[in-house]
Structures are given as structure tokens and as C-alpha cells.
Image (cartoon, grey):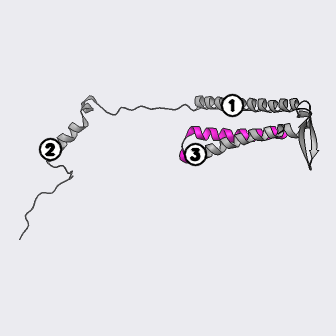
Amino acid sequence: MGSESQYHLLLELIILVCLITTLMAIGYPKSFFVSIVRSLGILFQGLWFVVMGFMIWTPSLTPRDCFMNREAGHHVVRCHSDEALERAKLVVNIQFSWYFMGVTVFAVSLYLLLGKIYPEKVEYASLTNSEEEHEDVEVQKESKLCESKSSIPLGETFAPFEMAR
């Protein structure tokens, strides 16, 4: 497994995060956390594709003691020793960590900036209009039921009339 495989292994990790958050969005469609992690995962996936393209296919950016070799019709990055291979993998892991931190700092900064630009406006309203209405709701219902002498609200009633037999 060379440095190319390490790039692709880390890409698979990002794809797995995107897949998991997409499946979680089925159960939690209005979750802000799931949506933001999925969006940042897709952003990071695209960024990592670009980094992979430059780092793998630009000969001057290959790690020290590694070289581009043509094998079976395509170019492969090979290293002279196992030590050089381990160093190349460590460089890939460090790059991944730096880009991950960059995306995280970008996301937190954007969240804080948008929080300042569009603050959440919480408006509080009183549930009662005056001090007289502080009585218990059940007491009010009971007094209305006693007035009407019926447990069924009828609304307007008509005067009784005699029916001929």
C-alpha cells in the first residue's frame, strides 16, 4: 500500500461520513447538526479530491525519496525504501489533518459570523392581559358550566314553543 492508497483510504473515510449523515437525515430531516456535518463532509470531499489531484499527479510534489513510475499503463508513486513509504504516508495523514482543521475552523467562523449578522430574535409575550385573569382556568370553566346548567355548550338557544298534537 503506497501513498496513493493512503489518499484513497482517507477519501473513503470522508465518503463514509457523508453516507452516514445522509442516512441519518432520513430519520432526522430537520436536524441542523446532521445537515451541517453532511454539507461540510461534501465540501471536504471536494477539497480532498483537488488535493489528491495535485499531490499525486504533480511530480514535483511527491514526497522525498519517492518517484512516479509507469506500471501497467498508468503512473504510480513508488518509494525507494520502507522508511520513505512510511514518511510519505505520514505526510498524507498530516495533510489530511491540516485540511480537516481548516474546514472545521472555516465552519465555526462562518457559523459565528452568520450568528452575528442574523441574530435569533426571541420575542416573549405575556399569557395573561391583566391581574384579574390569573384565576385558575378550571375555576373559570366550572363557573361557566354552572351558569348554563348544561355540560354541552349549545350556543344560542330558541324560546320553547308548543307543538300541536
Q: Residue at the location (55% across, 41% down)?
A: 31
Q: Residue at the location (77% across, 29% down)?
A: 94
Report the residue marked by disc 1.
106
Q: Quadrant of the N terminus?
A: top right
Within the image, what quadrant is residue 124 found in? Answer: top left
Q: Is residue 50 visible?
A: no
Q: Amino acid at mark 1?
A: Phe
Check disc 3 and report its element: helix, strand or loop. helix
Q: Residue at the location (66% across, 32% down)?
A: 107
Within the image, what quadrant is residue 138 found in? Answer: top left
- Work out how far the residue at label 2 is from the one at label 1, CA to CA, in angstroms: 66 Å
Viewer-closest of 43 and 92? 92
Viewer-closest of 91 and 100? 91
Q: Which residues are magenta?
A: 24-53
Report the residue marked by disc 2.
147
Check disc 2 and report its element: helix, strand or loop. helix
- Specify which label sits upstream in the sequence, 2 or 1: 1
| Magenta-colored stretch includes residue 85 | no
Dominant SS of magenta comes to helix
Q: Is residue 26 visible?
A: yes
- Specify which label sits upstream in the sequence, 2 or 3: 3
Q: Amino acid at mark 2?
A: Glu
Question: In the image, which is nearer the foreground, mark 2 or mark 1?
Answer: 1
Q: Residue at the location (87% across, 32% down)?
A: 82
Say which mark, if any, is on residue 25: 3
- Asked if labels 1 and 2 touch by Cβ distance under 8 angstroms, the answer is no
